[in-house]
Image (tube, rainbow, N blue to C red):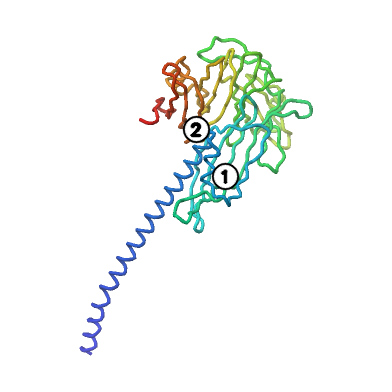
Amino acid sequence: MKKFISIFLILTLLILPAGCTSKKELSKVDKKRLEERKQDYKDAQNLIKLYMELVMQGKRDEARKYIAPSSNKKDIKTEFPLKPLGYSINRIEKIGNKLIASVKLSQGVKGKAYYTIDIADYTIGKKSDGDMVIENIQVKSNLVFFEAMVQGEKSLLLREDTHTEAIPVLKAFELPDYIANDIAFQPLKKVRINREKYGSAAISNDGKKMILCSVDGKNTIALAVERVVRAFNSKDKKVAEAAGTGGGGGTEKEEGASSGEAQRVDVVPLDYFEGATVEYVTFSPSGDCIYIQTRKGDKVGLSLYSTYSLKILSPKLMEKFNSPEYNIINAYFNNEDTLLVSAKNLKENKVENYILDIKNDVARKQGR
């Protein structure tokens, strides 16, 4: 018995070190795999950023170099040429041996009520040399906000993807004829809303908030429009009587006693641009900020507002880029609330690129 126990102990001592070594080796392998996976995610993110930056700058031919020739990418055809206004990388995940990046892209048409939000999956693989490449781009959702005539009435419509019917989200009669311009830095006066001529427009991700520009001669007023749905008791005569009347820059209508809901369209003046046109309007990817690009003669400037308070954001940045020294060439969001601006320094006659931190109201020149 003692002899058996001795043999067992000897074998145990021989096996244990081997087992510990195997665990250590396994730990090293796991650590290496984890590091490789982290690097793959980082490389994939850098590839998407590089590709999207070229797209935002209008360098689409150069951007296509990062797409595999075998890709079945198809551009969505639109009635007007779209300008990219902002993008964000929502997430990157691994499916099988591929990485899938979900990217949101906002685009608009210069001076027109036409705005799109696309969410697409970018499939990323590796070439034979180990470099990453975009193998496929598949649009998962396509939100289109545009102006059209519906039963002889000018309306703004929303289509949630290319295969569904567009629905009216704002009709001309829901806008007031005049609105009190109570913006702090403008003289208080009533401003006429031209319901027959719209300029640039944008819609939020959830489809509830809209920015619409009404053009009256050489002047433009930017309106913040929000559709609010409120539940009510169908027996409440006061609500029923109020339905369809509107007040304080909004209209309200009863959707039917059985539905128990009333919709109110709130219209608030965001800004008034005298003698100027609005070229582009967009929400930041986070939805927290509104960007407006204006032109007055040869001068192209920018304005930034809070989506929630509708007050001016980043007054120092607005003062800088609306001064006679600068002229905006291109601007787009490349993060939730980060704006990249390319501007002509008229004083020094050169193009300068800036990263605008909107929340902190500071601009950092690129290349420094």
What residue is drawn where x is 62% and y is 29%?
A: 109
Q: In this view, does 234 lie to the left or right of 131?
A: right
Q: Which residue lies furthest to the right in this view?
A: 151
Location of residue 15 with respect to 303 vertically, above or below: below
State the residue position of label 1: 120
| Quadrant occupied by the C terminus | top left
Find residue 250 and report its image quarter.
top right
Task: Please tell me which residue lies in front, 22 or 130.
Answer: 130
Provide residue 48's location: percent of width, then percent of height.
49, 44
Mark 1 crowd level (few <14, some 14–19, many ≥20, 10 Å Cα): many
Provide residue 18's location: percent of width, then percent of height.
28, 73
Provide residue 64's location: percent of width, then percent of height.
54, 43
* Residues at marks 2 and 1, CA–CA distance in whole angstroms: 17 Å
Disc nearer the start of the sequence (2/1): 1
Q: What secondary structure is marked by label 2?
A: strand
Mark 2 crowd level (few <14, some 14–19, many ≥20, 10 Å Cα): many
Q: What secondary structure is marked by label 1?
A: strand
Under mark 2, the amino acid is Phe
What residue is drawn where x is 47% and y is 56%?
A: 128
State the residue position of label 2: 333
Under mark 1, the amino acid is Ala
Provide residue 206's location: percent of width, then percent of height.
59, 36
| Quadrant occupied by the N terminus | bottom left
Q: Is residue 209 left or right of residue 32?
A: right
What residue is drawn where x is 44% and y is 22%?
A: 350
Q: Decide: marks 2, 1 in contact (CB < 8 A)? A: no
